[in-house]
Image: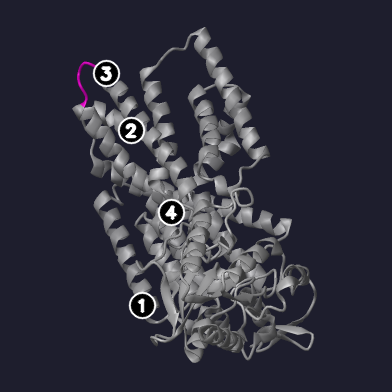
Amino acid sequence: MTRIVVADLVAQRFSLVSFGMMRIRRLFPALGIVIASSIVAGWFFTLPGEYQRHLRQACFALLSLSNLAFDADSGYFAAPAQTKPLLHTWSLGVEWQFYIWMPLIAAAVWRKALTSKPRIEVLIGAFCSVALASFVWCIWQSQSDLTGSAFFSLRARAWEPLAGGLIALIELRVHDDGGKALRLRKAAATLGWFIFAGCVTYPMPEKAWPGLPTLLPIVGAVLIVGARQQNLLARWPSLGFFQRIGDWSYSIYLWHWPIWVFALTWLSFRGYSVTFAAKMLIATASISLGAASYVLVEQPTRRNRDVLSDPRLMGIATASFCLLLAFTVTAFIRHGFPSRLPSYLGAAEEARRTDTPRDECFRNANSIKRVAEPYCEFGSQAPEAKKAILWGDSFANQYLAPISSAAIATGMHGLIATQSACRPFIDDALKHSSEQEPCRAFNRDTLNLVLSRADLSTVILGGNWGGPDEIAPLVQKLLSSGKTVVLILPLLNIGFDVPQRWMEEQARAGKAIREWKVEVDPRLTQETLRSEIAQRLAAYQEDPRLLLVDPQRAVCSGGYCFLVRNGQANFRDTAHISNVNAAQYQGLFDTAFKAAMRLSDLRGRS
């Protein structure tokens, strides 16, 4: 693409509209077919809420903004990738956005470049500057933004396509094919293949992507492409079969992920495992549909310009988007057309809701929430209400509804101090050096707040406890400061997505399953962890200010734990409780808060 832009600039015929229409003709027809097919398939395979989300993402994909849509839909409680048929279109969004501003920058630099220097050199310098700025931004954002926004960000990704553009510009400027240059090219190509082999052999951790390690595969690609060596390794992509795969690659890319998502859904609902044979069948289907799309959609669109002129193509694209938008609006009005699926599957989707009564107050991994107030409030608003604070991660925040109801019932007023993936602990530079700084800072600030305010007499602690070593020092610190501690014990370690498995079981049974219980076993109930916590807190068992809330008492009895009861799921994923059944925990907090209130009254009279 860079070569085309520069060639048009040299010939003084560059037009952003013409360049954009070339990209539309190249990318959009096949994309439109895949999106339409996924919408039809989604009608039969996705739940109402998922279908609404899928249609919204389809609209963004047609606008080449899907990277923004998926960035907004990322995070700790985001739907898994296997439920997003158009997730892969995020890269097309980044690519399209890149090819909007790259020609504009190139044209501006080209026209404003001083005649004392070759314009190609000025353009190379400009591309290098922008690529360096993008790479620095990528490194900074990947380390400072813990929500993963760098993955979908054009600013953090622009340096990658710019690397390819720089190869094209440098080749236009340098034409040295002497013996020394050939040897350097051969060495560069060999090094590039070694880098590729290393990246395949030793995959990089997901958390590091994108980031500094991303430089390795990009450098490898630059060395191989820039070397232009005609050795065996360089020639194999041009061999017949591989050339065909290369021609079909765009359409294969478009088809592979929707096929995988819907095939996985079909297999799981019927109780089949994803075998090697199934994976090979999915791969074959992706290649076959990609080849068909190339022959029947891509090629005719590119060649038949007389029949499918630019204005006609834009008219079809605009009409298609308007139809999709109208269907999407209708789907939201009709709540995802729930009547197309058995009614008993709706309860499983309802269980997946992640919103709590004050969801806007839950901090993300960057310690950012959607409201300006430092700490949101819950419970009683009476002036004489006793003060408390809820401190923890999502495993504390999940109980906010029953905690708030219990607080209102007992006359307690509380503050909300909860942050994603950040269990409570006393920050220690040695013990917590591997923890993210926003989490450490949040815990430091919360502890300082608790210790500095005598009116915060009750501290409610909850978290995804990894062990007792962090719980005991924090409990000791709070008790020694005169606080009453309400400690929420671990619930269940289920190991699978409860609503998803419940849907699959009901689909196979062909009827509603209103009760689903499993036998109690030490792994499910986290008996080892609970025993260790009990041992470490044994020294405080006589202290009435340590109040334990055991949520297992609400869902386990008679040697069984209920995953589904009375037609409602008790969990929204593999571990968190569902909002629809959260009220069953209120009695536990009622008891704890009444005890805390009595202790507070005794302290007040003493």
Badge 3 vs badge 4, beta-carbon distance below 8 Å: no
Residue type, label 3: Pro
Mark 2, secondary structure of its residue: helix
In which quarter of the view is residue 493 placed? bottom right
Mark 3, secondary structure of its residue: loop
Q: Which residue is mark 2?
A: 4
First in residue order: circle 3 vs circle 4: 4
Mark 1, secondary structure of its residue: helix
CA gap, disc 1 to disc 3?
56 Å
Q: Which residue is mark 4?
A: 30
CA gap, disc 3 to disc 4?
40 Å
First in residue order: circle 2 vs circle 4: 2
Picture quarter with the C terminus: bottom right
Picture quarter with the N terminus: top left
Q: Which residue is mark 1?
A: 330
Residue type, label 1: Thr
Q: Position of residue 84 (x, y in %)?
A: 51, 63
Badge 1 vs badge 3, beta-carbon distance below 8 Å: no
